[in-house]
Amino acid sequence: MRIDIITVLPEMIQGFFNCSIMSRAQKKGLAKICIHNLRDYTLDKHKRVDDYPYGGCAGMVMQIEPIDRCISELKAERQYDEVLFMTPDGEQFDQRIANTLSLSQNLIVLCGHFKGIDYRIREHFITKEISIGDYVLTGGELAAAVIVDAIVRIIPGVISDEQSALSDSFQDNLLAPPVYTRPAEYKGWKVPDILLSGHEKNIRDWELEQALERTKRLRPDLLEEK
């Protein structure tokens, strides 16, 4: 999978993709994450990519021209499954969307900034708008990092133990069950005996019961969606 991220602040997220699972995915050749500085695509001598909005409202708006140049250049080199835009008024991102996007070959992710982007960009270039929550960030860079992490980590082969990714919270609309590790007892706090029993079926049954209980208690809305 190739993911092209368009941003005015590449330095904000470059380090993130050079660490941990994101780094390993790229070294394995399972993902290629390319970050493009939007300022490289403007003809303005001061490298500005924003301007005052029509109508006189406050703030600055990202211009259509540099975004058009960047996206057009990328599309001339390959086909893209989706052109994503990070925005608070987009579709709420969840595991279902992550699973679907992980099947893509090529994605473009546009990070908004300033007051927003010229709406014609959303009308003519964007194929899917995504929000990571009902709040506003300074820009879309952090949101882009979140969704790319969620997408890439479930590509087969990225995580050595693929069963681990499949058992994460939300994969089956349930929260994950509790997990424990050594020591089996600490300050009198014990790991549940069932997990030490070695009985595979009983352990799986216990995990499902715990997942259901936690979901009913903490996120009953997930069960309503099933």
Image (cartoon, rainbow, N blue to C red):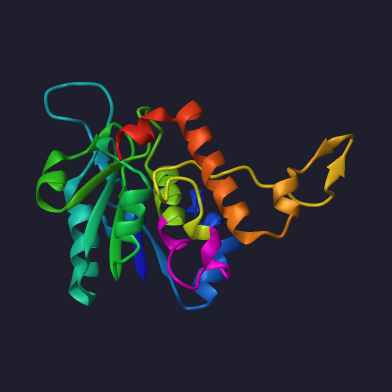
Query: Where residue 178 appears, x then y in whole percent?
Result: 63, 42
Residue 18 visible: no
Examine the image and state in which quarter residue 117 appears.
top left
The stretch of residues the image draws in magenta is: 151-164
Q: Residue at x 41, y 29 (%)?
A: 220
> Magenta segment, principal secondary structure?
loop
Q: Nearer the viewer, residue 160 or 225?
A: 225
Nearer the observer, 187 or 103: 187
In the image, 148: left or right of 204? left
Image quarter of the N terminus: bottom left
**On the rendered structure, is 124 left or right of 204?**
left
Looking at the image, residue 202 sits to the left or right of residue 132; the answer is right
| Image position of 200 (left or right of 29) | right
In the displayed structure, would residue 177 be above or below residue 136?
below
- Residue at 58 percent across and 70 percent down: it is 160
In this view, the residue farthest toward the right is 187
Vertical placement of residue 173 versus 20, above or below? above
For the image, the number of numbered tags is 0
